[in-house]
Image (tube, helix red, strand yellow):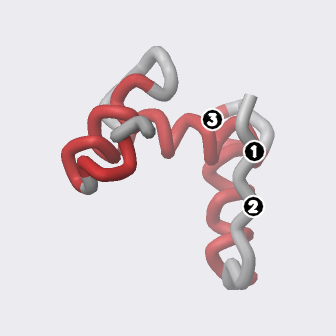
Amino acid sequence: MPTITIHNLSAETHRALQAQAKAAGRSTEAEVRHILDRAGGSTAGTTGWVRYIAGANPRRMRRG
């Protein structure tokens, strides 16, 4: 499975993510995955992001 690293995240944002994760009963990592999955339009994972990326930048999806 792909990995993503986010640099220069503010301490305030990190604390907010931790609090949100705790309230939802998830780890911070699981909460970030949940947020990204919702933002990508998919409750099942990456499908929504693939469509989003393809629509936003069709060249990224070209092969060859």
Name the quadrant containing residue 39.
top left
Label 2: which residue?
Answer: 5
Q: Which residue bears the numbered disc 1?
A: 3
Q: Quadrant of residue 62?
A: top left
Q: Which mark sits nearer the N-terminus, 3 or 2?
A: 2
Q: Position of residue 55 (x, y in %)?
A: 20, 45
Q: Secondary structure at mark 1?
A: loop
Up the image or down, 40 lies above or below 46; here it is below
Left or right relative to 32: residue 46: left
Pick out the residue farthest to the front.
64
Name the residue: 65% across, 59% down. 17
Type of amino acid at the residue the image marks with label 3: Ala
Q: Give how far apart the Cα atoms at labels 3 and 1 are.
A: 22 Å
Q: CA distance from mark 3 to mark 2?
A: 22 Å
Residue at the limit of the structure toward the top, as seen here: 44
| Secondary structure state at the residue bearing disc 2 | loop
Q: Which residue is mark 3?
A: 24
Quarter occupied by the N terminus: top right
The three-letter code of the residue at mark 2 reads: Thr
Q: How many marks?
A: 3
Q: Position of residue 27 (x, y in %)?
A: 79, 39
Q: Residues within 10 Å of mark 2 (few under 14, many from 20)?
A: few
Q: Reading the chain from its start, which is encountered first: label 3 or label 1?
A: 1
Distance between the Cα atoms at labels 2 and 1? 7 Å
Query: Mark 2 near mark 1, Cβ–Cβ under 8 Å?
Result: yes
Residue toward you, 58 or 28: 58
Q: Position of residue 32 (x, y in %)?
A: 62, 47
